[in-house]
Image (tube, helix red, strand yellow):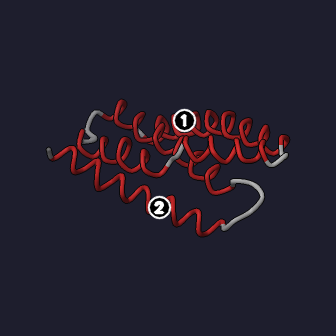
């Protein structure tokens, strides 16, 4: 039950963080806020999981809270999907394609950077 509560609390914090990012970006013709949280989330989850694997001393509960909880609440596939679909339906096909390409390539790149950094800072 403790782990469920950890994920619940950290997930709520991740959702609030995502909401604050959305407020900071405001409404624009491109889903910058969703792109930002997904790229940052890709970097951070790779960093945390790789550090956990390399160091072996990151407590399981902290790992779970940061990844499944916070990053699960912070990142959003459903908003990415909806916003990309809206771009297509509103006649902004090029923007939709750019959003998909930047999200996929950027997410993988951000994840690789997270792995690289973890390997640099792990003892």
Quarter in which the N terminus is drawn:
top left
Residue at 58% across / 47% down in the picture? 79
Does the CB distance between marks 2 and 1 fall below 8 Å?
no
Residue at (40, 35) in percent of width and height = 49
Q: Residues within 10 Å of mark 2 (few under 14, many from 20)?
A: some
Q: Marks 2 and 1, Cα distance to the nearest angstrom? A: 25 Å
Mark 2 against mark 1, which lies toward the viewer? 2
Residue 107 spot, x, y in % from top left: 62, 38
Identified at 53% across, 46% down, the residue is 76
Label 2 secondary element:
helix
Position of 70 with respect to 82 (left or right) is left
Residue under numbered circle 1: 116
Pointer 2 residue? 17
Horizontal side of 61 relative to 88 (left or right) equals: left
Residue 45, percent across and down? 46, 41
Which is more toward the observer, 30 or 49? Answer: 30
Residue 118 coordinates in the image, percent (x, y): 46, 39
Classify residue 109 by image quadrant.
top right
Q: Earlier in the sequence, mark 2 or mark 1?
A: 2
Image quarter of residue 43: top right
Residue drawn at x 73%, y 43% is 99
Q: Answer above or below: position of 27 versus 86.
A: below
């Amino acid at each position: 039950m403790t782990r469920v509560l950890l994920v619940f609390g950290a997930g709520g914090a991740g959702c609030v963080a995502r909401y604050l990012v959305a407020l900071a970006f405001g409404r624009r013709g491109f889903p910058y806020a969703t792109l930002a949280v997904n790229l940052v989330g890709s970097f951070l989850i790779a960093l945390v999981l790789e550090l956990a694997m390399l160091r072996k001393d990151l407590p399981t509960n902290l790992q779970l809270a940061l990844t499944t909880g916070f990053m699960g609440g912070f990142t959003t596939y459903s908003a990415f999907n909806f916003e990309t679909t809206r771009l297509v339906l509103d006649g902004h096909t090029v923007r939709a394609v750019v959003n998909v390409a930047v999200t996929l390539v950027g997410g993988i790149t951000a994840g690789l950077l997270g792995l690289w950094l973890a390997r640099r800072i792990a003892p």
